[in-house]
Image (tube, rainbow, N blue to C red):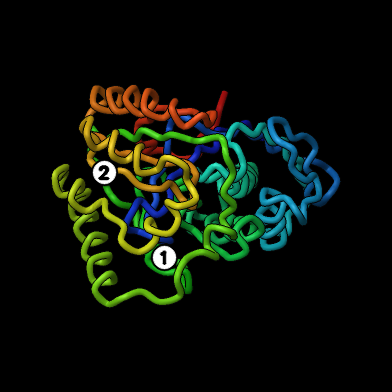
């Protein structure tokens, strides 16, 4: 195989209480990429469609992660990368991680899969750092592993795959404004109260237990963020209205996707998710801000090859 076309999915990070450690993979939205072996050595980005992104491999997240793998593997070939960008940069659903993870996934397949998903996560984190100014895995891990993931540790890197209840769906609304990850991190407090810390780690533990036991009510009671949401929600016009509308129409919980501006709601059943989507769509029209809203099953596969 000398060429691979792949789908690199959008992801939701933090998942309310799991700041920088929890994430899940979406099915409805993602980038497409083509990775191709070349005779000439090195990494080259030859095509980008959808958004205006740098072709310079040292400034593009897909290029930086690709170079990290390339330097480790030192193959006798080179690679060309084509990016068909469907995830808007700064949207809060893992645009940069989709590019970073997609390039290393494709190269790994073409090299005969010498690296594990964990090792690919480490390479992709180098690219993700270009966008967020620090290495994170909470978007990259679900893209590469699929489903829900927990970043147990960055040093050493340890990713835990979590089970996903069969009837769990996500509704995501994306207001068409940009919130840069680096900017969203700057407004967070350096210190939090012991009371809030206890509440937060209690919610993380109970959310993970809820995922393991298919306890939708426990999942609902756990999707509360007392550390990050009070600050970042100020960057998202109409956030409280979205949350109130979703919960009133049956959502298990609602929170900020990544650093925003996208907002996710987890729902039990597609029927409930469709109801929540419709209600959010109707409620948000009063904001006079362009937006997209969609329903997605949790993507258990992660990045996948396309025919």
- Disc 1 element: strand
- Disc 2 element: strand
The answer to which quarter of the image holds residue 192 is: bottom left
Query: Is residue 168 or residue 282 the one in the foreground?
Result: 282
Residue 91 location in percent, x, y? 55, 42
Front label number (2 vs 1):
2
Identify the residue at the far right of this view: 40
The answer to which quarter of the image holds residue 263 is: top left
Count residues near mark 1 (Cα–Cα under 10 Å), then give few for <14, some for 14-19, many for 20+.
some
Sequence order check, earlier mark of 2 and 1: 1
Query: Is residue 4 or residue 288 the one in the foreground?
Result: 288
Dot label at residue 32: none
The answer to whether one can see residue 293 in this image is yes
Which residue is disc 1 drawn over? 158
Count residues near mark 2 (Cα–Cα under 10 Å), then give few for <14, some for 14-19, many for 20+.
many
Which residue is disc 2 drawn over? 253
The answer to whether one can see residue 166 in this image is no
Residue 220 location in percent, x, y? 20, 46
- Quarter holding the C terminus is top right
Real-space Cα distance between discs 2 and 1? 27 Å
Which residue is rendered at x = 78% and y = 42% of the image?
45
Which residue is rendered at x = 34% and y = 22% of the image?
278
């Amino acid at each position: 195989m000398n060429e691979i076309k792949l789908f690199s999915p959008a992801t939701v990070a933090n998942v309310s209480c799991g700041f920088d450690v929890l994430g899940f993979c979406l099915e409805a939205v993602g980038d497409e990429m083509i990775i191709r072996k070349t005779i000439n050595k090195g990494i080259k980005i030859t095509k980008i469609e959808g958004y205006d992104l740098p072709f310079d491999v040292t400034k593009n997240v897909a290029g930086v992660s690709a170079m990290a793998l390339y330097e480790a593997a030192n193959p006798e070939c080179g690679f060309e990368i084509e990016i068909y960008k469907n995830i808007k940069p700064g949207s809060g659903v893992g645009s940069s991680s989709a590019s970073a993870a997609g390039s290393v996934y494709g190269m790994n397949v073409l090299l005969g899969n010498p690296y594990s998903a964990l090792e690919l996560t480490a390479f992709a984190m180098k690219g993700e750092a270009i966008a967020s100014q620090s290495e994170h895995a909470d978007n990259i891990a679900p893209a590469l592993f699929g489903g829900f993931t927990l970043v147990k540790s960055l040093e050493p890197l340890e990713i835990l795959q979590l089970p996903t209840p069969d009837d769990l769906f996500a509704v995501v609304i994306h207001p068409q404004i940009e919130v840069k990850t680096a900017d969203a991190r700057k407004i967070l407090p350096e210190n939090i109260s012991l009371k809030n810390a206890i509440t937060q780690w209690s919610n993380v533990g109970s959310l993970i237990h809820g995922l393991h036991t298919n306890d939708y009510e426990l999942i609902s009671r756990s999707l509360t963020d007392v550390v990050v949401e009070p600050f970042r929600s100020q960057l998202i016009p109409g956030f409280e209205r979205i949350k109130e509308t979703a919960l009133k129409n049956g959502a298990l919980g609602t929170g900020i996707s990544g650093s925003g501006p996208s907002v996710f709601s987890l729902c039990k059943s597609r029927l409930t998710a469709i109801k929540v989507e419709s209600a959010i769509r109707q409620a948000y029209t009063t904001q006079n801000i362009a937006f997209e809203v969609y329903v997605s099953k949790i993507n258990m596969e992660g990045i996948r090859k396309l025919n």
